[in-house]
Amino acid sequence: MRKTFKLVDLDCAHCAAKIEDSVRKMEGVTGVEVNFLSQKMVLEASEEYFSEIADKVVKRIRKIEPDVTVKKI
Amino acid sequence: MTKKQKKQLYRILTSILIFLPVLWLPLNETGKFIGFLVCYAVIGWDIIWKAVTNILHGQVFDENFLMTVATVGAMCLGDYKEGVAVMLFYQVGELFQSYAVSKSRRSIAGLMDIRPDYANVVRDGKETRVEPDEVLVGDVILVKPGERIPLDGIVLEGSSTLDTSALTGESMPRETGAGAEVISGCINQTGTLRIRVSRPYGESTVSKILDLVENASSKKSKSEAFITRFARYYTPSVVAAAALLAILPPLITGQAFAPWIHRALTFLVISCPCALVISVPLSFFGGIGGASKCGVLIKGSNYLEALAKAETVVFDKTGTLTKGSFAVTRCYPRGITGERLLELAACAEKDSNHPISRSIVRAYRKNTEQFTVSDVQEIPGHGISVTQNGKNVLAGNAKLMKSRKITFQPVKEAGTVVYVAEDGKYRGAVLIEDEIKEDAAFAVSELKKAGVQKTVMLTGDTKAVGEKVAGKLGLDLVYTELLPADKVAHMEELLARTSEKGRLAFVGDGINDAPVLARADIGIAMGGLGSDAAIEAADIVIMTDEPSKIAAAMRISRKTLAIVRQNIVFALGVKAVVLLLGALGIASMWAAVFADVGVAVIAILNAVRALRVPKEEKVLRKENFREAPAG
């Protein structure tokens, strides 16, 4: 399952790369792509646990970049 | 400005209000120290906080940490003023960067603002407003004037004009009416339309295009890949160099540590590759955005990069350089007027659906219903025979004339020839050709001007027709009578002949040429509007039917690459110079902070230029066609 999230206040390209690297290594995440310019993250994970994985991803992002807020589209 | 940016702005202003009095008031040493410390806390607390939390998360070398070390270091060495000012400038630069990026982001997003927000669906006679993806195939939707068409479909009722500029860059509105196919993303201008939805939202033109544009940045160009790799090594190496600079010279020469540490701190300020990391992808994003403004969709910055190096451009003929529709181009009347010849032909062909027949009826222009014909006989492979006003009218090819033993004058011109006879007497011939697009010759000459060395045409058509078209357009090479498999073989050969650095682009209409599109370095599909095959198979999609857009796209790609190159050279150059001067103790931290944020800001402003596309690229330059060699 793929879902797109909006990353509000994602301001630096370098932070986007950091988020992408970190989320990619998380358990259950099969694919992730963070686009700094469109401020979007496409998350791919198994359908079954998607909402749990997404919650964890949101928490992880809050830890890495406290300025960024994750919004569902 | 966003909320976050405003907050940042107030913080900067507050700290300036503290900074200036402290700088100018005749305070003693302790007073100054306390004043600067307060100011530093106001402006730099978040950077320090981030540095600390990031270290706790195991990330050491991020820019927050480096800035903290540099400024705290400067203050420890007694340069309070410098420490505070560097932090202040850094924050000003960061704010400016964030503002510039969000502004260009908004203007690019504005370009791609073709996403429909809602659909008015009619169910059980009632109109309800729903999300576009809730509408099912076969549903009927209402689109009022001023609204965006949310889904692809067929007009059931109503007539209107459509603004397709968001999709094609073309400002001429398009007429539409009952029975016509409409494409999502266009804006309905004048009348209300009832539309039967033919495709679900996920497969509609609009979501395909959005998907394509938004994912364009995932296909990275070489310059982007270079910057990413460079950034990974740049920061650690500069930090390592700073450490060496702080320790080695004093140990070797026995000088004091303080000035060398001071020089090393200068290094830390320049250690972030921000300018490049932001401006390079931003330039490509801008270039892709600018191209889409003119109706050219580029699927990735790697293709934008390749397009700038196009050396050979190979065209498919039908549908690309020609309209793919037949038209009467010449009449050869015998003993009657041309008008009368067309009338005879049109009267014979009036009920036939063959494209050739339709073109004759169109050329006649008048209503053909006035004719009453009888004994209509279609003779397969020959033509048609009818009786009108008691006279037998024949229209067909040379075989038909021969079989009826009619003496006729063969037409040598390339194209399809229809001979006409009335009551056994030869009356003349009509020449029908596939029409060349208005801007085709202009497109070829513009490509030459843009630096393309070879233009080639591949066609399945006959040698005579193919060479005639190629001659008219001024193409360098033409291969005719090709089967689809032959096209691939010729493509291989042309690819082999293309130089190491040059690229080969193939332009087709996406029908029957998918393998060739895939084989070329750059596959360009024409007339993407409404054709899924084209959007999927190609790397670049020209939304309109104008081949001249290829040259426009080439110019945009050249400009984008020039901007990228300028930014890389400028940013690296300034940083290298400041690093060198810093090591020699000539450049201060002030210069370093300029080399960091100042350069980033300038590079971003330069990158924004990629988005701007001259107006004339957007519209078909009709006035230029006449200047182009007409052949």
Image (cartoon, coloured by chain):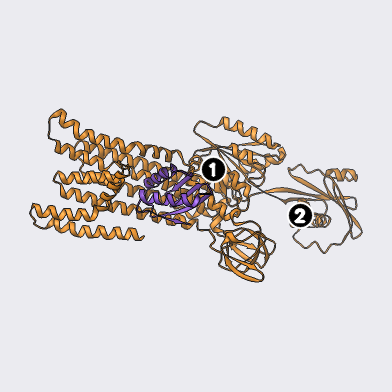
Chain colours: A purple, B orange
Q: Quadrant of residue B562?
A: top left
Residue B335 placement (x, y as % from top left) = 83, 52
Residue B267 placement (x, y as % from top left) = 24, 39
User: Which residue is depicted at the point 50% across and 58% down?
Assistant: B113
Nearer to us in this view, A15 or B23: A15
Classify residue B521 as left or right of residue B575. right
Nearer to us in this view, A26 or B440: A26
| Rendered-image quadrant of the N terminus of chain B | bottom left
Q: The residue under label 2 is which amino acid type?
A: Arg
User: Which residue is depicted at the point 81% across and 63% down?
Assistant: B369
Nearer to us in this view, B406 or B384: B384
Chain name for mark 1: B
Nearer to us in this view, B396 or B597: B597
Q: Which residue is mark 1?
A: B447
Residue B318 placement (x, y as % from top left) = 67, 45
Give the mark nearer the N terminus: 2 vs 1.
2
Q: Is residue B374 visible from the viewing direction of this image? A: yes
List the single residue furthest toward the right: B390
Task: Decide: is B191 above or below B572.
Answer: below
CA gap, disc 2 to disc 1? Answer: 34 Å
Q: Secondary structure at mark 2?
A: helix
Q: Which residue is mark 2?
A: B358
Q: The residue under label 1 is which amino acid type?
A: Leu
Q: Which label lies toward us, 2 or 1?
A: 2
